[in-house]
Amino acid sequence: MGRIKTGELLERRELESIRGDSIGIPDESKYIHLQFRRFAGCPMCNLHLRSFIQRHDEIESLGIREVVVFHSSKEALLKNQNDAPFDLIADPEKSLYREFGVEKSVWSVLHPGVWLPAFKVVLSGGFSLHSWKESKFGLPADFFIAKNGQVVACMYGKHSYDQWTVDEVIEIVQNANK
């Protein structure tokens, strides 16, 4: 399937979180920020998700439900991401990735845009080779989905650290509420 576009209306789907919760997308009561990340132990993903964990209460107070998809097994996510206060989806077969047109590229790790974040990861001690059993070339993607299923905004990353910040997600919801 091709890439999802802003303005597109998504069909309702039920996903299951790693904790067994049912997640309806769209959600009639909340906006959904659907994040596609790489693998469970990805140092770049972990650095990025820390900012969403730190500001989770603020995000939630704006009526946004964070749903994060990884191309990892449920077991790998429970081991590496168990403290996340939002919904995590295991998609080791990458069926959602294909459905949403989320791609992979060798540039995901070679692009100059990853050098500074990679340096921060190394300095923080967040780098570990044991978690690098899964594909390293996945690209991130972000989708902001309205309560009626319309894609309000979307972004396909060009490298492994090319995704929306918390401030960008907040700006999107503020514009959607105007």
Image (cartoon, grey):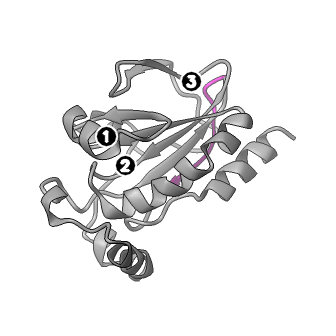
Numbered disc in front, either 3 or 2: 3
Which numbered marker is on residue 102?
2
> Which residue is more in the foreground, 30 or 126?
126
> Which residue is more in the foreground, 51 or 151?
51
Main secondary structure type of the part rendered in magenta: strand
Expressed as whole percent of the image width and height from the top left, the position of residue 6 reads 61, 44
Expressed as whole percent of the image width and height from the top left, the position of residue 177 reads 82, 38
From the image, tell me which residue sits under label 1: 98
From the image, tell me which residue sits under label 3: 26
Q: What whole-number distance in Å separates the C-alpha atoms at marks 1 and 2?
A: 6 Å
Q: Quadrant of residue 108?
A: bottom left
Q: Amino acid at mark 2?
A: Val
Q: Residues within 10 Å of mark 3 (few under 14, many from 20)?
A: many
Q: Is residue 1 visible in the rendered structure shown here?
A: no
Range of magenta residues: 148-156
Quick one: SS at disc 3? loop
